[in-house]
Amino acid sequence: MNEPLLAVRDLTVELFLHGGWRPAVHGVGFDLREGETLAVVGETGCGKTLLGLALLQLVPEGARVAGSVVSRGRDLLGLTESQWREVRGGEIAMVFQEPAAALDPVQTIGSQIVEGVRRHRAVSPREAREIARGLLAEVSFPAPERGLEEYPHRLSGGLKQRAFLAIALAGNPAILIADEPTTALDATVSADVLELVDRLRRDRGLAVILITHDLAAVARHSDRTLVLYAGRVVEEAATADLFRSPRHPYTRALLECLPRIGAGPARLRPIPGLVPDLAFRPSGVCAFAPRCPDRFSPCEVSEPPLFPAGAGVARCFLYERGAAGPETRRTT
Amino acid sequence: MSETDELLRAEEITKTYPIRRGVFGTSAKRLKAVDAVTFGVRRGETLGLVGESGSGKTTSGRLVARLEEPDSGRILFDGEDWLALSGKALRRRRRDLQVIFQDPQTSLNPRMTAGDQVAEPLRVQRIVPRRGLRARVEELLAEVGLGAEAASRLPSEFSGGQRQRIAIARALATRPKFVICDEPVSSLDVSVAAQVLNLLLELREKKGLSYLFISHDLATVERISDRIAVMYLGRIVEEGPAREVTSHPLHPYTAALLSAVPDADPSSGRLRVILPGEPPSPAEPPSGCAFHPRCPIARPRCREETPPLFPFPAGRSAACFFPGELDPGRGEGPRL
């Protein structure tokens, strides 16, 4: 198989909290290939947003980052700030949940795209404007010529997100990190924007990292899924496989507490308890064990590594070689 | 269905707001946030009001709660003309109708302990004698799954889900018959949202409550509601028994909302309905059927005529000239 566009290994982001270094992102690894969408899912506090930011070296002041993020044969974590300016937008671009906060309110959409284009490509102002118009058309912005002259506050939420995507594409990146790109949007608008991201991925061969808490978006718009819990990857699998047969007890529980249409009047099955706070996370044991219906003796003694589970991997002793597996365990 | 077993009935309620234009804001134009909306909630029943931003669902809830006054229409609550009540009589009757808001972060007072917040309605309404106050507060906290020690803590010391539990305890303090839940779980993570939804279901059974459950999320609404009303641009476009509406939607907008909900199996091949564009501004509603510019099955007629809510069998209704044509559950109809 061809080289991955991005090879992340053992990526850890530690924050100094309550007198100690706490890993908010803990030993995360994955490969990202051209034209694929990798979903990163998890609940508040699982580290998904920080993971996305760390891939662009945009971490809070004082945070400690370790591991490696290899792209095009070099480790991005070793780049200088001026090299990073090339990479951000030029190789890896990012869109966020709140386009309103990310767009400059006093600049037209056009000049913001032009700025991005000229930062990464040696073109004349006129050419840059032509490229900008093309980008707005590419993201299906109605009347792109007029759109160039619009200010962000005059746009609806869905159009702001389209404009934001056009700006993100200005540097012709190979990788797009989309952090909760549709959380602030209505359901029908959000479906439309996610379809657009899919189309951009197909047309441009973009690799997309879709960071979200929205399992519906994951199910529909990704090839592979990483499930994060308390800073750790607890499961990685092909998305269709993950939804059909989730392996990790956390993934299973998460899918079970999702309201689904036509599931009948039965009660939802919530996960008892709460995600452990970063400052009080147990270390050296399975972080999910206190809330886990399947926990057994090894879970409170050591932390499981990622074991092969189905066609993917799961950080759970149920999949330790020779273990009986969850179904047989439950019946005993 | 007889109207007498309805605890709440809203008839043709309408609310408009002036649109300010120019320096002096003297434009006579008005925006119709809620346009002649009619619905009823029977005793012990939950009506889910679902729609996106600008649909008028939250305004409808605020009108029923009398946080705002409708321009016209009638609201009957527990057999009484709810809009005719004022002053002391209204204050007294308010104990029967309470509201839970989306964001307990802003609906709770950050400087008041959880116990004081729950006790406040009891004090104001003078429902419980002073001596019994503390015991009643602890009882209410226990009902929402919080320990007595929670009473002395401030909202900031709780998680989002726990704060919503405090807001629920506060709403239940006056022993209401009817509770308006406005996006009560929308700001919570799925696992916590499921806990709070189950709590609301449990309390409804235990106390025989009726809910008006307002949400943008059709799957959540289906889970908790007996009936569902779907709103678009200030109007109800479809109404009926929850399971009927979600298994075979009559209105194409309902079908689109349904299509945005997670599938148990993403490879099920269920028809996907992707709508172009965004909901138009209620300040400039389109002609004819307000949904026609985004509707995948719109015909010329839809541009010119506004469909009324047509009645259908099994207590259903839909405001569409071509009902049931777009049904993602059936996997047929036009491919989009």
Image (cartoon, rainbow, N blue to C red):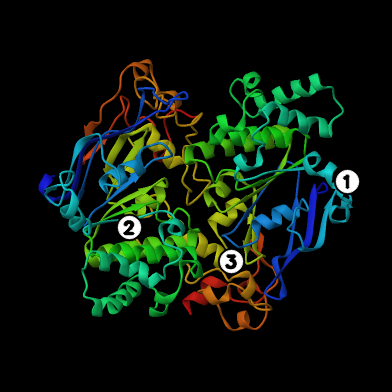
Chain under disc 2 = A
Q: Residue at x 84, y 30 (%)?
A: A121
Q: Is disc 3 placed on a helix, strand or loop?
A: loop
Residue marked by disc 3: A248
Same chain assignment for discs 3 and 1: yes
Please name whichever residue, A253 or A329, is drawn nearer the observer in this view of the structure. A253
Tag nearer the camera, 1 or 2: 1
Question: Circle 1 sits on which residue?
Answer: A82
**Against A192, is A56 above or below?**
below
Residue B196: where, in percent of width, then height?
Answer: 40, 63
N-terminal of the pair, mark 2 or mark 3, is: 3
Q: Could you tell whether A142 is left or right of B62 in the image?
A: right
Residue B266 image offset from top left, x and y in percent: 52, 47
Residue at 35% x, 61% y is A266
Q: Give the Cα distance between marks 3 and 1.
A: 41 Å
Front residue (pair A243, A108): A108
Q: Give the residue at x 50% y 50%.
A: B265
Disc 1 is placed on an element classified as helix
Q: Which residue is mark 2?
A: A265
Q: Amino acid at mark 3?
A: His
Q: Are marks 3 and 1 in contact (CB under 8 Å)?
A: no
